[in-house]
Image: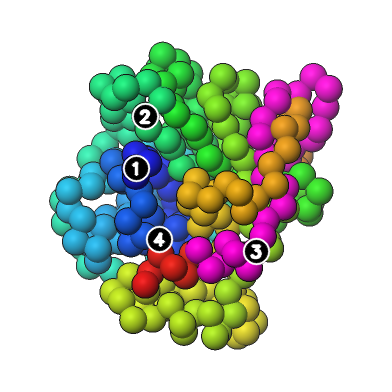
Amino acid sequence: MNRRVVIDTDPGLDDAVAILFALACGRFDVLGLTTVAGNIGLERTSANAGGLLAVMERGDIPVVSGAATAMLRDNIDAIVVHGADGLRGITLPPPLAPVQTDAVAWLAETLLAAPSGSIDILALGPLTNIGHLVSAFPEAAGRIGQLIVMGGAIAEPGNSGPASEFNFAADPEAVALVLRSDIRTTIVPLDVTRRLRADRAYIEALRGSKAGDLVADILTAYLVDGKQSRPLHDPCVMLLALAPELFEIEVLRLSVNLGDDPDAGALTRTDTGSPVAVAMRVDAERALALLASGFR
Ligand code: RIB
Ligand code: CA
């Protein structure tokens, strides 16, 4: 039975791999892509999301754009990693359908129209859209089956500030709203995602299908030293959704730094923090094999 999912995303090279895997593996019913400003601005993340659907000939799946800015802060970006176009020069066809607007209202309508708990949200970027959903449509947010989030760092150094991870640093207030909500949430932090990287042999072995060829091109653009890719952050969300047994999950009480210092968005374990499931370890070999299997 395929899981019905909405992917909230800021594509972004690793988002693109995660989205193509979800579309190609045949194990998800993707109801829509909601987009958010993150790696690059909202216009680009939305165009990239539409381009990925066009490659897969999935014009039936809507792209619904959401937040162009964080809830309370100036935007940060990750252009240094993803390039100004968000895909390091990889060109995609134009979207098959116009990008819709108001992702938060669309999420609320979609969740309220479906049986409670029947739709999961796979969150690959800053949590701004989800934060607005929790704030403006708490009844709809309460109908989310599970929310799996790429974000945060527990024992790992950050990739935005010394201890803060990019998605959470981009909108700490949204993280706080989500952690304090009663949505069944699992966080996949840098402690796990940094264990998944692709080398050249792995990348070339993905080729042989439309999605596999594009993912191989994307991962080649995502190589950090010519030998290994940067961490496969966002694909870990889809892999956990499909095979949670590949991950070791702990429930931690977490608080998020809402200050104005370089570690805004950083997580700390506190007795008064919100209890949330956190993937702390992964069987990287089996996770990489599962990822590759999605493109065969
Ligand atoms: O810290 C990694 C996260 O930030 C990933 O989701 C990547 O796409 C960027 O959004
Ligand atoms: Ca992302």
Q: Earlier in the sequence, mark 3 or mark 2?
A: 2
Extent of the magenta region = 264-290
Which residue corresponds to the image point at 76% horizontal and 24% vertical from the top-left?
273
Which residue corresponds to the image point at 28% horizontal and 69% vertical from the top-left?
92
Q: Position of residue 252 (x, y in %)?
A: 75, 32
What is the three-letter code of the residue carrying label 4? Phe
Magenta stretch encompasses residue 198:
no
The residue to which callout 3 is attached is 284
Which residue corresponds to the image point at 45% horizontal and 58% vertical from the top-left?
18
The residue to which callout 4 is attached is 21
Q: Give the number of marks.
A: 4
The residue to which callout 2 is attached is 118
Q: Is residue 179 visible?
A: yes
When asked about the image quadrant of residue 187, the answer is top right
Magenta stretch encompasses residue 265:
yes
Q: Earlier in the sequence, mark 1 or mark 4?
A: 1
What is the three-letter code of the residue carrying label 2? Ser
Q: Earlier in the sequence, mark 4 or mark 2?
A: 4
Q: Nearer the viewer, residue 149 or 97?
A: 149
* Quadrant housing the N terminus: top left
The residue to which callout 1 is attached is 1
Which residue corresponds to the image point at 55% horizontal and 84% vertical from the top-left?
200
User: On the picture, is 182 further left or further right than 257?
Assistant: left
Local secondary structure at mark 2: loop
Q: Is mark 2 within 8 Å of ligand 2?
A: no
Distance between the alpha carbons at the discs numbered 4 and 3: 17 Å
Q: Quadrant of ligand 1?
A: bottom right
Distance between the alpha carbons at the discs numbered 3 and 2: 29 Å
Select label 4 or label 3 by which is in front. Answer: 3
